[in-house]
Image (cartoon, grey):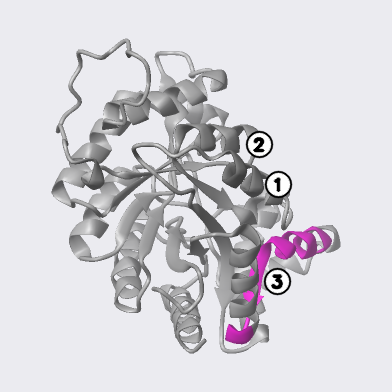
Amino acid sequence: MNIGVNFNLGVLDQSPVRYNDTYQTALHESIELAKICEKIGYVKYWVAEQHNSKSLACASPEILLSKIASSTSTMEIGSGGIMIQNYSALKVAEQYLVLDAIYPGRISLGIGKAKGTDELGALALAYPRSIIDSSLFSEQVRDVLYFLGYKNTKKHAFSKLKPLPNIENMNLCPKIWLLGSSPESAKLAASSGINFAIADFLTPRYSYTNVANLFKRDFRASIYQTNPEICVALDVVCAPTEEEAMYLASSQDLVYANSLKEIFPSDGLLPPEEAIIYLEKDKFLREILKQQKINRIIGNPIQVINKIKALAKHYHAQYVLILTNCYSLTARVTSYKLIAQGMNNE
């Protein structure tokens, strides 16, 4: 969706799970949401990786991406992201080479440093081997690039290995993004000549300003990318009125509150009317949530669109991904539609 401003819109989908519903439902709703968002003009659809979670369903982005790609025809489909420390660089590269061979020119690979899970999940993913040392992250990223064919490095230890399928046309290779929040990540993306993605909603607003500027300043053109591109992910709930948007956001508020202090004996999204009851019981958590909401964009279309535009301009972003976790698929679809309609009217 080219919206008359200097950025395009996409979706970040965490496949949220409703309380007392199934993971299967959440994954099928991700597929349905992708089809709808393509029809209304979104140009990207990224899915997240989570393990050992009771509130988020997707543990295998590459499999979900394949189904979403087969159910759509124009959107760029990607991972936001693949947590590389859980895997071997070769395996990740080959998975996305296969995806790109099946859906040429539509696949993006977002690489993240976080584990996407708790300590138990990280141990299980590595077992019976040891967890990969986080100090090896930059080496893993460069290995992925090498196996994908971006051979702008010195002779590699596996130079005789041929990742499959072999793609000679670099324009068809998966588009690579590094997910990051630190100066080190920005420098790694810049020195590698790959794109940079920022999850704005994870820390206090504007905390990534210097990181984005550092990436832009230090970027070195590569055989992969000639100009630096930034993608920023924003947590958004849009509804016809601000009051309704705040009401719908309470389902995700409770999930966040529960991660700090158990006030509900399970995970997953509760209906807003029930989530509010639990949230009103704890004054301390209500104050924390007020601060947490600073990182989110919640409101009517005019309020939401103005904030999205301001943040896109602030980060000099070429792409903005919208993350919307509501109890019902209908509410999520409405939010994405209102944003698309509002942007098209700009």
Q: Secondary structure at mark 1?
A: helix
Q: Residue at x 51, y 85 (%)?
A: 342
Q: Which mark is residue 277?
A: 3
Q: Which residues make up the magenta segment?
A: 287-302
Tag 3's secondary structure?
A: helix
- Magenta segment includes 291: yes
Image-based side of 213 in relation to 146, left or right: right
Contact (CB < 8 A) between labels 3 and 1? Answer: no
> Label 1 is placed on what type of residue?
Asn
Of residues 67 and 165, the one drawn nearer to the viewer in this rendering: 165
Q: Is residue 95 above or below residue 312?
A: above
Can you give x and y, in whole percent of width and height, for residue 211 in the image?
66, 44
Q: Dot 2: within a 10 Å radius of its alpha carbon, few (fewer than 14), some, or many (20 or more) residues?
A: some
Marks 1 and 2 sit apart, C-alpha to C-alpha, by 8 Å
Picture quadrant of residue 97: top left
Tell me the residue at 56%/66% (across/down).
Answer: 270
Q: Main secondary structure of the magenta part?
A: helix
Mark 2 to mark 3 CA distance (whole Å): 41 Å
* Whether label 1 touches label 2, CB < 8 Å: yes
Q: Which residue position holds label 2? A: 183
| Nearer to us in this view, 21 or 206 | 206
User: Sequence-wise, which precedes: disc 3 or disc 1?
Assistant: 1
